[in-house]
Amino acid sequence: MSRPDIHLVDADHEIERQFRLVMRRLPGGVCIITAGQGEDITGMTVTSLTSLSASPPRLLVSINRQASSFAPIVRHRLFGVNILGSDQQALAERFSNGRLKGRERFEGTDWTHGASGVPLLQRSLAMIECQVEEIIERHSYGIIVGRLASMELSHRLSGLTYWNGQYVQIDHGADLDLLAEVSIPLAHVR
């Protein structure tokens, strides 16, 4: 049995670098968190979304408090979740582009205002409007607990994940070989 390639050192920055390498091994679903009201809107690409509870329906998202989306979420107590499909990598890249700010990220995209006024990206696998139930501030991040206000589910069955520093497109019907390449046992997807 081979030994893992992990070396603990005392320097905090080296431990943080190694921690990032470890966490890159965990595939994450790609979502865009949208926020704001009226013309003052923004959004960001995240892989830090997870379910907290099905009963009652709650989710968690972790956002850097310096991110442009954090302040509007705190101010309006609302946000949108847009789960991206396998064909939406360009959208994920657009909303993670640091040169684009606020409304610029939405230019040329198909979006609408939800019932709460929060922007939602059409053609997403799922669009969810959330009310902020709680924000837990830890270190440089805010862990946001969202109470589902509305949701819309697409009929498409594809997904966009982020793994080991790259986007991986998963289409259940066409990409079984790709799933095998990223070490997901095929017995679990058939």
Image: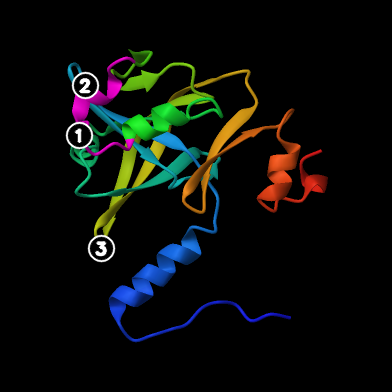
Q: Which mark is residue 37?
A: 2
Residue type for callout 1: Pro
Instruction: Say what amino acid the circle numbered 3 marks.
Output: His
Q: Earlier in the sequence, mark 3 or mark 1?
A: 1
First reached walking from the N terminus: tag 3 or tag 2: 2
Q: Which residue is drawn at the image coordinates 30% and 78% (left, top)?
A: 12
- Kindly state the secondary structure of the residue where label 3 is placed: loop
| Contact? badges 3 and 1 (CB < 8 Å) | no
Vertical side of 27 occupied by 175: above or below: above
Give the position of the N terminus as an image quadrant: bottom right
Report whether 107 appears left or right of 46: left
| Position of residue 126 measured from the top left corner of the image (x, y, whole percent) | 51, 25
Say which element carries label 2: strand
Image quadrant of residue 148? top left
Q: Earlier in the sequence, mark 2 or mark 1?
A: 2
C-alpha gap between disc 3 and disc 2: 27 Å
Query: Would you say the residues marked 2 and 1 are in contact, meaning their CB atoms lie under 8 Å apart?
Result: yes
Question: In the image, which residues are magenta?
Answer: 96-108
Residue 22 covered by magenta stretch = no
Residue beneath label 1, please?
Answer: 72
- Identify which residue, 118 or 25, lies in the foreground: 25
Which disc number belongs to residue 139? 3
